[in-house]
């Protein structure tokens, strides 16, 4: 009974992490398909959106970016292939997409055979992977390359991804995911427990999505150590850049002369405080690495330009680790709008740089709906449940009271993200 | 009875020692600057923008205390309290594992006016520091503790909001100078509303969830905590930080702490990460690893066995629900 309870607790508390996964994964699966050859030249915003109303200045004369910000309209990071190089939806398409997504939200009660591992995996189905925000005008946040897709991975990054994927599949091969040939077993086949279960992961594990967004990361079907779990479950999922997701995304920007601070309220209590020094000082020495890198800001007219380097090898963004380099441009377009544009490059990960543009909409300062807590970490007895549940299952197996843990798909097991449960990627019209 | 990780204990103590080292270093400053007038904003109020740090021992114990041989001690040869020796968790750290002495930051008679019931809890907290101090778990530090932990804090002072960004676990507090709705729930860091009284920034802080401590000595408060903080410039590079502490569930009367906050004068100073969630995984979850990282050392290598019995009510999930 105790075993079962702990396992259930473990599974339940993974919800927070899974929600974070959802945020990351909304863009990720599509990213694995090779993109066509890139073309030059970033796309631009529609003329009416770019109409820069007189945006205010701070009392000390800097452009004023301050306030609470989020985005009111949902735009997929990558453009679904069926839209080709078309940058904007028609009004009819937006209405149809909103209707289709509303129907998905109504399907949240659909169940697999109750009590099965697949049923548990299906707790995180399309309904929770679909936000309630209406679809925006743009067909992708990515404005360059013009096809709206993350550029292809370099051979080096593909190799890293494949190594992680092979490890994931090895740890799944004795489970029902492979026995029933579910999509989560893609690339593997059913067999006895792999000796690789005793190995350390081939690379530092980061995010939840099976196969890893773009080339790495990945949850594994094992809970030997906290480090076996993904960064979301470890309450360290916050990444830079962050384009939001269905677990909430609010920015609070406060400035002073020489510094801009942004609190990222993101990922269900995994938010963090960022301070951007506006300075001509060089970056930190290259051996000093940080999870969120090292930011250096400067004002270019009305735009805050931020150069971010010095990321940690444990940082993970869409397949990129310590070599990630960002150039962000924060511009107040009008009283209620900030344009955030970021050029993302890592020659060890992608074959070319790419650029994302997102519009942030002003939120009500008086309502102050911005939470720096409750934080994931302070309540993370889910990690205790996951680890203690795994130890209890091992003891039960050793005593002949339970199945070999290697044959069980636990806490999603890295299988559902690619379709073991009911992946939102497959059914969400914005990411399909 | 639970074995606990030697490594994690040492890690904690090392972190503490390293943090103390930072404090000591921050004292260094050029001469003459103390006479420079306080910086002012465009609208004439003192400008506290910049990176600051307390430079005292308050995070060890708000009250005056003599140096101790270790953050955790045990009875040695003698039965006297003054002759205790370092205990296993910090033993390997030698002189880096001790607690520095302090003249204290509690105003007046230096006493903290606990109710008798609360005084008993305070004493028990001190005896179970490792089990109970939220700092060791990398939990949000709360106010006022975040202001005098041995990590820098960056103040961004704007017209309607003042933001304080803390290096410790990359958290923050916002002081609202404008009117905002009440928060929907109590929190670790509380809800801060500020106003100017002449050159003093007065901040009223309420809505705490009662899970924080004041220091590593076990001084604590409840969810009824109400703070009135006063930030007054001493010079361009120093702020007098005073806090009136009120909590009728724990204290018999309001009491005050006071200390300077010093500007970090290094030209290249910036806030770096102290993302301790990762650092405490062994501390919090190490006993649940499939294979423990703790090993008995052999031969000339030091062997430390630590027995850590977690008292009823202090297990991780119990603490959270308390």
Image (tube, coloured by chain):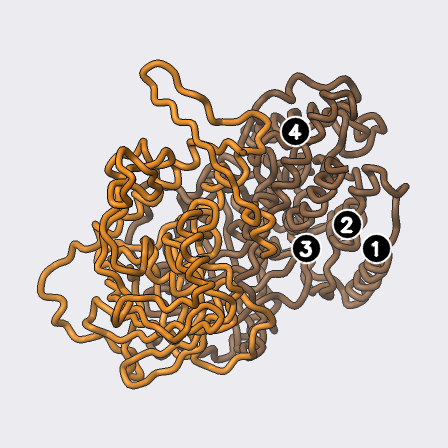
Chain colours: A brown, B orange
Check the image and report above or below for A78 versus A210. below
Q: Closer to the camera, B242 or B203?
A: B242
How far is the residue under mark 4 from the one under mark 3? 25 Å
Side (left or right) of A6 relative to B94: right
Q: Earlier in the sequence, mark 4 or mark 3?
A: 3
Reading the image, the residue beneath label 4 is: A165
How far is the residue under mark 1 from the one under mark 2? 27 Å
The reply to whether callout 4 and callout 1 are in contact (CB within 8 Å) is no
The residue at 23%/51% (across/down) is B66
Res. A303 in view: no
Reading the image, the residue beneath label 1 is: A108
Disc 2: which chain?
A
How far is the residue under mark 4 from the one under mark 1? 30 Å
User: In the rendered image, which quarter is residue B305 located in?
Assistant: top left
The reply to whether callout 3 and callout 1 are in contact (CB within 8 Å) is no
Quarter of the picture containing the N terminus of chain A is top right
Looking at the picture, do discs 2 and 4 lie on one chain? yes
Q: Nearer the viewer, mark 4 or mark 1?
A: 1
Mark 2: secondary structure: helix
Disc 3: which chain?
A
């Amino acid at each position: 009974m105790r075993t079962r309870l702990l396992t259930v607790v473990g599974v339940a508390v993974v919800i927070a992490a899974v929600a974070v996964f959802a945020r990351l994964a909304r863009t990720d699966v599509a990213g694995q398909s090779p993109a066509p050859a890139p073309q030059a030249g970033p796309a631009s915003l529609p003329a009416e959106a770019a109409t820069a109303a007189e945006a205010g200045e701070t009392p000390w004369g800097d452009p004023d970016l301050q306030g609470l910000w989020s985005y009111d309209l949902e735009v997929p990071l990558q453009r679904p292939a069926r839209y080709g190089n078309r940058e904007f939806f028609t009004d009819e398409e937006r209405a149809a997409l909103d209707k289709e997504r509303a129907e998905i939200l109504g399907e949240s009660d659909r169940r697999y055979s109750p009590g099965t591992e697949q049923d548990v995996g299906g707790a995180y189905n399309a309904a929770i992977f679909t936000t309630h925000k209406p679809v925006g005008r743009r067909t992708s946040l990515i404005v360059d390359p013009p096809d709206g897709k993350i550029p292809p991975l370099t051979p080096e990054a593909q190799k890293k991804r494949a190594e992680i994927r092979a490890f994931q599949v090895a740890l799944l091969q004795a489970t029902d995911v492979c026995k029933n040939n579910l999509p989560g077993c893609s690339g593997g086949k059913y067999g006895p427990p792999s000796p690789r279960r005793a190995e350390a992961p081939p690379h530092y594990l980061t995010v939840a999505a099976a196969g890893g967004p773009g080339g790495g990361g990945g949850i594994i079907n094992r809970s030997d150590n906290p480090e076996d779990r993904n960064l979301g479950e470890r309450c360290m999922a916050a990444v830079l850049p962050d384009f939001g997701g269905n677990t909430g995304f609010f920015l609070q920007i406060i400035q002073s002369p020489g510094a801009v601070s942004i609190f990222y309220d993101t990922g269900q209590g995994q938010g963090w405080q960022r301070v951007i020094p506006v300075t001509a000082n060089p970056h930190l020495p290259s051996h000093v690495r940080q999870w969120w890198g090292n930011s250096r800001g400067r004002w270019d007219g009305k735009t805050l330009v931020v150069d971010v380097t010095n990321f940690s090898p444990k940082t993970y963004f869409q397949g990129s680790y310590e070599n990630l380099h960002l150039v962000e441009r924060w511009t107040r377009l009008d009283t209620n709008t900030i344009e955030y544009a970021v050029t993302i490059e890592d020659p060890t990960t992608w074959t070319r740089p790419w650029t994302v543009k997102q519009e942030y909409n002003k939120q009500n300062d008086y309502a102050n709906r911005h939470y720096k807590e409750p934080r994931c970490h302070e309540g993370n007895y889910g990690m205790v449940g996951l680890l203690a549940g795994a130890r209890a299952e091992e003891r039960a197996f050793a005593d002949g009271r339970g199945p070999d843990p290697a044959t069980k798909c636990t806490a999603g097991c890295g299988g559902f993200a690619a379709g073991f449960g009911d992946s939102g990627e497959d059914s969400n019209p914005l990411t399909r | 009875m639970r074995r606990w990780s030697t490594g994690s204990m040492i890690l904690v103590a090392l972190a503490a020692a390293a943090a103390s080292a930072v404090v000591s270093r921050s004292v260094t400053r050029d001469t003459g600057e103390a006479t420079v007038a306080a910086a002012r904003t465009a609208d004439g109020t003192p400008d506290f923008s910049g990176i600051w740090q307390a430079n005292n021992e308050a995070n060890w114990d708000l009250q005056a205390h003599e140096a101790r041989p270790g953050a955790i001690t045990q009875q040695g040869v003698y039965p006297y309290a003054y002759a205790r020796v370092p205990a296993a968790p910090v033993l390997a750290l030698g002189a880096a594992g001790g607690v520095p002495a302090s003249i204290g930051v509690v105003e007046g008679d230096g006493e903290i006016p606990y109710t008798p019931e609360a005084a008993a809890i305070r004493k028990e907290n001190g005896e179970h520091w490792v089990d109970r101090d939220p700092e060791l778990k990398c939990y949000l530090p709360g106010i006022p503790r975040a202001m005098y932990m041995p990590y820098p804090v960056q103040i961004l002072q704007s017209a309607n909001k003042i933001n304080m960004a803390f290096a410790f676990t990359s958290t923050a507090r916002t002081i609202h100078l404008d009117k905002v709705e009440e928060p929907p729930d109590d929190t670790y860091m509380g809800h801060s509303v500020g106003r100017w009284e002449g050159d003093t920034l007065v901040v009223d802080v309420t809505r705490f969830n009662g899970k924080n401590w004041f220091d590593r000595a076990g001084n604590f408060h409840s969810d009824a905590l109400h703070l009135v903080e006063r930030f007054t410039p001493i010079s361009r590079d120093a702020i007098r930080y005073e806090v009136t502490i009120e909590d009728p569930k724990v204290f018999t009367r309001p009491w005050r702490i006071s200390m300077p906050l010093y500007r970090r004068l290094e030209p290249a100073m910036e806030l770096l990460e102290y993302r301790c969630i990762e650092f405490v995984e062994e501390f919090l979850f190490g006993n649940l690893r499939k294979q423990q990282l703790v090993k008995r050392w052999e031969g000339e290598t030091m062997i430390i066995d630590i027995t850590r019995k977690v008292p009823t009510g202090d297990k991780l999930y119990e603490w959270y629900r308390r």
